[in-house]
Amino acid sequence: MSHYWTSDDAQEFRALQLADWIEDLAKFPAHHVATAVAEWRQTQSRRPTPADIIKIIGRIQQTSNARRLAGPSGITPERRAEFAAYEAEWKEKFRLGDKYRKSLARPIEP
């Protein structure tokens, strides 16, 4: 079965094609699908199949994950260490504050 329509396809056949596209692409974030489709339109001269779009989405997701794991760009390792120390300090303060608050809690007597 072809996964792109042609002008002589019956309406029922187009509906089946669309259902396949939706089923295959619905599990991905809409912005990744839109970016992949736009990239295909700008770089390819033939019609895509769902597999073609899914391959591009996979690359987009890998790039997105790598950027997220790398952290903010332009921050030096020293500055990143400062942020980590600051975060650790505040986490400890919150932990101690929570511990203190729990120590003040008394059971309500009937």
Image: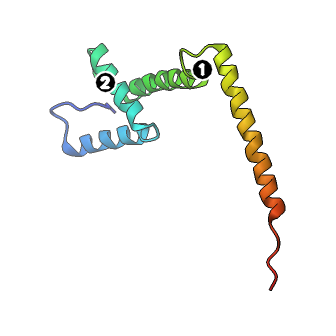
Report the side of 12 relative to 58 (left or right). Answer: left
Vertical arrangement, residue 106 with respect to residue 89, above or below: below
Which of labels 2 and 1 is toward the front?
1
Report the side of 49 relative to 70 (left or right). Answer: left
Residue drawn at x 64%, y 18% as measured from the top left: 79
Do tag 2 and tag 1 residues touch (Cβ < 8 Å)? no
Instruction: Determine the CA span between mark 2 and mark 1.
Output: 26 Å
Judging from the image, what secondary structure is the residue with disc 1 in? helix
Q: Amino acid at mark 2?
A: Ala
Question: Viewer-proximal residue, 82 or 74?
Answer: 82
Looking at the rendered structure, which numbered label has been put on residue 38?
2
Q: Which residue is mark 1?
A: 70
Residue drawn at x 39%, y 26% as measured from the top left: 53
Question: Viewer-proximal residue, 48 or 103?
Answer: 103
Q: Earlier in the sequence, mark 2 or mark 1?
A: 2
Report the side of 71 relative to 11 (left or right). Answer: right
Residue 20 in the image, given as x and y percentages of width and height: 37, 40
Vertical arrangement, residue 88 with respect to residue 81, above or below: below
Residue drawn at x 56%, y 26% as measured from the top left: 68
Question: Viewer-proximal residue, 51 or 33?
Answer: 33
Quadrant showing the N terminus: top left
Quadrant showing the C terminus: bottom right
Residue 91 in the image, given as x and y percentages of width and height: 73, 40
Residue 103 in the image, given as x and y percentages of width and height: 84, 60
Question: Viewer-proximal residue, 21 or 110?
Answer: 110
On the image, which quarter does residue 54 sit in?
top left
Q: Amino acid at mark 1?
A: Ala
